[in-house]
Amino acid sequence: CCKQKGVRSVVPFGTDETISRIVADYSDMLLRLASARLDSAADAEDAVQEAFLRLLTARPVFRDGEHEKAWLIRTTLQRASDIRRKADQRNIPLEDVAEPAAPESAREELRSAVRALPEMYGAVVHLHYYEGYSIKEIGKLLGLPAATVGTRLARGRERLRQMLREDVV
């Protein structure tokens, strides 16, 4: 998907320095992104590790740094979605589920609400508000038109308002 004829990385991909740079540059951001989509810190770490593992096995060739970042973000979101889907498929008897802890603060309540959003809204809300990307940048990262990102952001905000309003009532 990402290999193009005649396009080469500046530094050969498999070098230790390239891999170290990619991990250092993107680990924190990808972990925050995965944490926004998953309830467990361990699951978020797994999603990021799986994204890096896929990077090592697929060895894509990137046009530039933005292409590299976009690929990592999309791959992390896909891995997080896979993990979430598997967790949703488990049928656990209600008696076996521990009572969830109450949110510690309004900030944690908001993070929980963002995690509860459908992925298409949660990803753009997280990238915009937590990572500071503009609508245009998110569009490039996710391969979507800016208008679609804007619509998803607006709908995600509205769903958050409704969810938080229901919690107050």
Image (tube, rainbow, N blue to C red):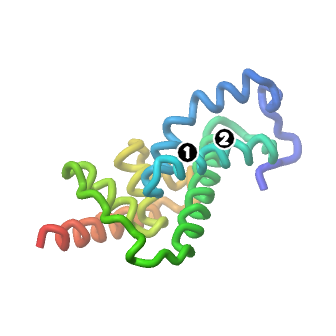
Q: Residues within 10 Å of mark 2 (few under 14, many from 20)?
A: some
Residue 68 marker: 2
**Left or right side of 151 for 49:** right
Residue ranking furthest to the right: 5
Residue 161: % across, % down = 23, 67
Residue 151: % across, % down = 40, 68
The answer to whether mark 1 and mark 2 are in CB contact below 8 A is no
Question: Residue at (55%, 45%) from the top-left corner?
Answer: 45
**Left or right side of 45 for 106:** left
Disc 2 is placed on an element classified as helix
- Gap in angstroms between the C-alphas marked 1 and 2: 20 Å
Q: Residues within 10 Å of mark 1 (few under 14, many from 20)?
A: some
Inspect this view and state whether residue 151 appears. Answer: no
Residue 121: % across, % down = 42, 65
Question: Residue at (87%, 41%) from the top-left corner?
Answer: 6
Disc 1 is placed on an element classified as helix
Residue ranking furthest to the left: 169
Residue ranking furthest to the front: 95
Q: Quadrant of residue 93?
A: bottom left
Judging by the rendered image, the residue that carries numbered circle 1 is 45
**Left or right side of 95 for 163:** left
Inspect this view and state whether residue 156 appears. Answer: yes
Q: Earlier in the sequence, mark 1 or mark 2?
A: 1
Residue 103 marker: none
